[in-house]
Image (spheres, rainbow, N blue to C red):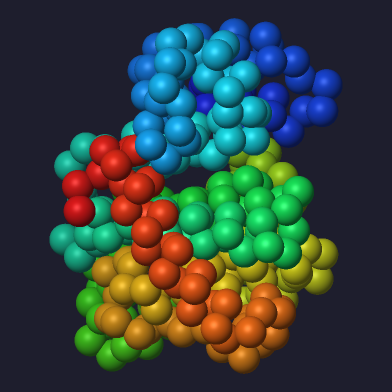
């Protein structure tokens, strides 16, 4: 499900002994991904202007930013092709994923700077379980989406009622299969139940908070407006005054608009 160059890149970036040249060689095996990374590096979002090779892109962006871009590209590839679901809006899904990723990075920079890019990746793939459902059980996914939209009950709760499991659990298993860090695995698995994460609660709570803020900003991923909101527990975990949270919402909307241009996503 994950392109070889992507899985190798994710493994190398998490290896403290990995050199830039090793990462460069891994990416050079996939010319399409290499071209997209170079284009992203030269976009207004990342601020480059004369990045012409993957080596220069790695040097300019840094390894952790490369991981973020590669995850975004992989997500695009996984969503390409004709949809088998009638109710999953892939543009809305992508916008919500971007919004959560951007929000996770913002919150990470404010609270856990060393984890900011890792949190961006977790935010980007937090709903990856929905793509698994779209591919393998599209009719059941459509039923869950329809009920969530009609009732306003969060999708993950509807999934538990109908399927007996939800997209967060499936996404967590996929992140584990992809050998992503424990921080990312847990953030994906527990993004609807952050308090259940006994190992990496602080980082998971930031991703869960970003997910709720994305819904509040209108990036609601095919669900009814207001299906998820920032609750007291997550607001407390973020440890920010409400005025600052309001500013974060505004920044998220502006950053998503810029990121959409970087990834060439139709609004």
State the residue in front, 194 or 72. Answer: 72
What's the residue at 42%, 40% (across, down)? 45
| Quadrant, the N terminus | top left
From the viewer's perspective, is residue 1 above or below residue 112? above
State the residue in front, 255 or 83. Answer: 255
- Give residue 242's position: percent from left, percent from top: 57, 86
What's the residue at 49%, 51% (across, down)? 124
Q: Is residue 2 visible?
A: no
From the viewer's perspective, is residue 131 above or below residue 12? below
- Give residue 249's position: percent from left, percent from top: 45, 72
**Horizontal placement of 256 versus 188: left or right?**
left
Write down the quadrant of residue 187 in the picture: bottom right
From the viewer's perspective, is residue 59 above or below residue 171? above
- Give residue 43's position: percent from left, percent from top: 37, 32
From the viewer's perspective, is residue 157 above or below residue 249? below
- Give residue 20's position: percent from left, percent from top: 69, 15
Q: Is residue 248 visible?
A: yes
What's the residue at 73%, 33% (across, down)? 14
**Horizontal placement of 196 versus 154: left or right?**
right
Write down the quadrant of residue 82 in the picture: top left
What's the residue at 57%, 11% (across, down)? 55
Number of numbered discs overlaid on the protein picture: 0
């Amino acid at each position: 499900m994950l392109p070889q160059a992507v899985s190798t890149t994710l493994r190398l970036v998490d290896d403290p002994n990995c050199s830039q040249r090793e990462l460069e060689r891994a990416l050079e095996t996939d010319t399409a991904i290499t071209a997209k990374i170079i284009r992203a590096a030269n976009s207004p979002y990342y601020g480059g202007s004369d990045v012409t090779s993957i080596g220069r892109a790695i040097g300019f962006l840094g390894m952790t930013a490369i991981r973020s871009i590669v995850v975004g590209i992989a997500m695009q590839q996984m969503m390409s092709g004709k949809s088998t679901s009638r109710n999953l809006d892939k543009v809305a899904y992508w916008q919500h994923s971007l919004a959560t990723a951007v929000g996770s990075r913002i919150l990470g920079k404010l609270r856990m700077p060393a984890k900011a890019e890792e949190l961006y990746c977790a935010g980007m793939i937090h709903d990856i379980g929905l793509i698994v459902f779209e591919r393998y059980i599209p009719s059941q996914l459509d039923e869950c989406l329809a009920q969530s939209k009609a009732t306003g009950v969060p999708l993950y709760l509807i999934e538990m009622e109908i399927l007996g499991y939800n997209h967060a659990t499936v996404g967590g298993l996929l992140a584990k299969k992809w050998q992503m860090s424990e921080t990312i695995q847990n953030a994906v698995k527990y993004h609807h139940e952050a308090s259940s994460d006994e190992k990496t609660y602080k980082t998971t709570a930031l991703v869960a908070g970003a997910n709720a803020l994305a819904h509040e900003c209108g990036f609601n991923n095919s669900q009814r407006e207001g299906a998820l909101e920032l609750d007291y527990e997550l607001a407390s975990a973020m440890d920010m005054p409400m005025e600052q949270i309001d500013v974060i919402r505004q920044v998220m909307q502006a950053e998503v608009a810029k990121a959409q241009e970087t990834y060439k996503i139709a609004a």
